[in-house]
């Protein structure tokens, strides 16, 4: 991540840190959701639907 020095000089440090934390957390959440979807698709391709047993251990 790079931040233009001019922006950083004018920005509120706490606000910038909060925005970065929110953006990073959102990216992590999206990556986890994508991973779950990909794993579900791979499992379905390998084992079929299994009669609804894919939710046996949670999401």
Image (tube, grey):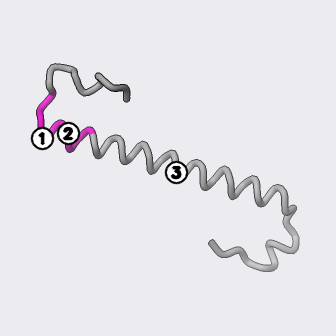
Residue 56 in the image: state x and y as whole percent: 29, 22
Cβ atoms under marks 1 and 2 closer than 8 Å: yes
Residue 51 in the image: state x and y as whole percent: 15, 20
Farthest residue in the bottom direction? Answer: 5
Cβ atoms under marks 3 and 1 closer than 8 Å: no
As drawn, is 56 to the left or to the right of 44?
right
Label 1: state its secondary structure.
Answer: helix
Residue linked to disc 2? 43
Q: Which residues are magenta?
A: 40-49
Q: Is residue 5 above or below residue 40?
A: below
| Residue 22 disc label | none
Q: Residues within 10 Å of mark 1 (few under 14, many from 20)?
A: few
Cα distance in 3D space between marks 3 and 1: 27 Å
- Occupied quadrant, residue 14: bottom right
Residue linked to disc 1? 46
| Residue 28 disc label | 3
Q: Is residue 32 above or below residue 24?
A: above
As drawn, is 29 to the left or to the right of 36?
right
Residue 10 in the image: state x and y as whole percent: 87, 70
């Amino acid at each position: 991540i790079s931040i233009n020095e001019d922006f950083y000089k004018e920005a509120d440090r706490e606000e910038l840190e909060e925005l970065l934390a929110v953006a990073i957390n959102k990216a992590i959440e999206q990556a986890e959701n994508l991973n779950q979807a990909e794993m579900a698709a791979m499992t379905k391709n390998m084992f079929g639907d299994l009669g609804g047993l894919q939710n046996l251990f949670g999401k």
